[in-house]
Amino acid sequence: MSKVKNPMELIDRYLQAVRFWLPKTRRQEELLAELGEDLRSQIEEKEIALGRPANEEDVSTILKRCGAPMMVASSLAPKRHLIGPTLYPIYTFVLKMVLLWILVPVFLFIVGPVNLANAGGNVGTAIAQTMGNLWSGVFIAAGVITLVFAVLERTQAVVGDSCKWDPSSLPPLEKQERKTSLVQAVCELGFGWFGLIWLLLLPQYPVLILGPAAAFLRAAPMWHTFYLPIVLLAAAGVVRSAVILVKPQWTWFPPASHLLQTALSLLLLRFILTAAGQVASGNWHPFVVVAEGVSDSVKFIHIAAIVNASILLSLACTWFGLCIAAGIQTWEFMRFVRNRVTGVNQIVNLHVQ
Amino acid sequence: MANGTQGDAEIFENLKLELRRGCLTLAVLTQLRTERYGYTLRKALADDGLEIDEGTLYPLLRRLESQGLLVSQWREEDKRNKRFYKLSSQGEQTLKLLMDEWQRINASLSKILQEA
């Protein structure tokens, strides 16, 4: 530490260091002036007690007791959250959904195979390239989501203050068996809309699913048959989420509709997989084909084969996952029905007694 | 075990902070029935056994002033500019209500603690 001629200079240096961490507003300047005055008063009192002018050590002791400049600034500054405790659980949910359930599968089943084909079958290069792309993708997605929630956090304060509510508009008392929380229902609806819009944009913007491979690949004719049922199923999912949100008292609806949606998805997937199996084995490109007029078609046919195999694998995994989900949902639905019947019987017994 | 002790100490510190927060506001308002500036207010509180650091006091004073409970004025004293605070008329009314509430809570708590 450099020696100072005037120990009081340490106070100004200290205040300057605190100022660095504070927003430049008049309020903060006034707080700093008060802090400075407080410190000078403490030194003055110390000098009276010691009967001599304060030296550098005396001033340092007082400043050390006051705390490190950054800590003092943090207690003086107005308390703000980038994302507050109200939105934080939804933020982490959306982040997990996007990163784990959208980004990672897209990279695993679409970008990875395309990179592998572009790298001429060199697995090491393809993995390194995919990991690099995934890394940037994760950062961009996380950044955008954080930004959106930070904006929501700022606007929420305004909306929250002006929001008028009427207790009589509260939804009827929930029954115990209801499992779908409001946050979950809102997120499901949001993601459902997002998914539906994404699906509707796919014919015009194949890049949304194929990424850079959209330059030389296009959807196979089989999608002319299956695109509309897929869109209808996604739209039904949105309607289902909206009904759960609007009619939370329909406790039978979430398990029943979930099971129905899974059953329909399984049926559709079964037709898609069967149709894929019926494509001629000599030219097996059921999901994507090389676009017309693309040069170096041998290379791109190889890429198309890898992408087709990846899509088949992902569809098979989805089918397997849906089978497990259907089993669990059937059990949940049966349990719901059993509880309902038991509950009704108990009420009847109470009335009889 | 060490972690448990550390955790207990942290829980106690947090609970103590929560307990002190409301009491500090009441103490500050009460002390400011007489006009004071920051340092003398801190000293008066410390002399009565309620220490408060600079980082807690000045934002609290600013908040109470923005709520209309305090009025402040920059004035020169002993060749230095100091900000003097005093209870506003609204602050006096609020303090009266708070003191009543405090007496009520204190009586209830004393009763509860005696029963324990």
Image (cartoon, rainbow, N blue to C red):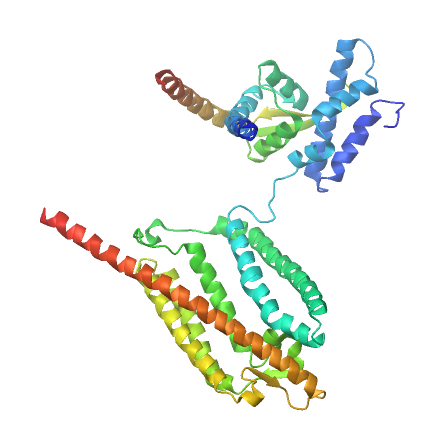
Left-right relation of B113 to B27: left
Identify whether B105 is placed above or below A225.
Answer: above
In which quadrant of the rendered view does residue B9 lie? top right
Image location of residue A92, percent across then percent down? 54, 53
Residue furthest out toward the bottom: A293
- Is A127 in front, or is A338? A127
The reply to whether residue A206 is visible in this rendering is no
Q: In this view, does A14 lie to the left or right of A327?
A: right
> In what quadrant of the picture does the N terminus of chain A appear?
top right
Tell me, yes or no, if residue B80 can be seen here. Answer: yes
Residue drawn 53% across the image and 52% down it = A156
Quarter of the figure with residue A262: bottom left
Instruction: Name, please, the residue furthest toward the left.
Output: A352
Q: A148 or A211, which lies in front?
A: A211
Residue displayed at 31% across by 59% down = A251
Residue closer to the observer: A327 or B95: A327
- Closest to the observer, A240 or A105: A105
Residue A288 in picture, x, y percent from top left: 58, 82
Q: Position of residue A343 (x, y in %)?
A: 21, 53
Q: Where is residue A122 in the image (x, y as percent from the top left)?
A: 71, 72
Where is A19 relative to A274, above or below?
above
**A323 relative to A315 in the view: left or right:** left
Rendered residue at 65%/78% (across/down): A213
Compared with residue A272, is residue B47 higher up or lower down, i.e. above or below? above
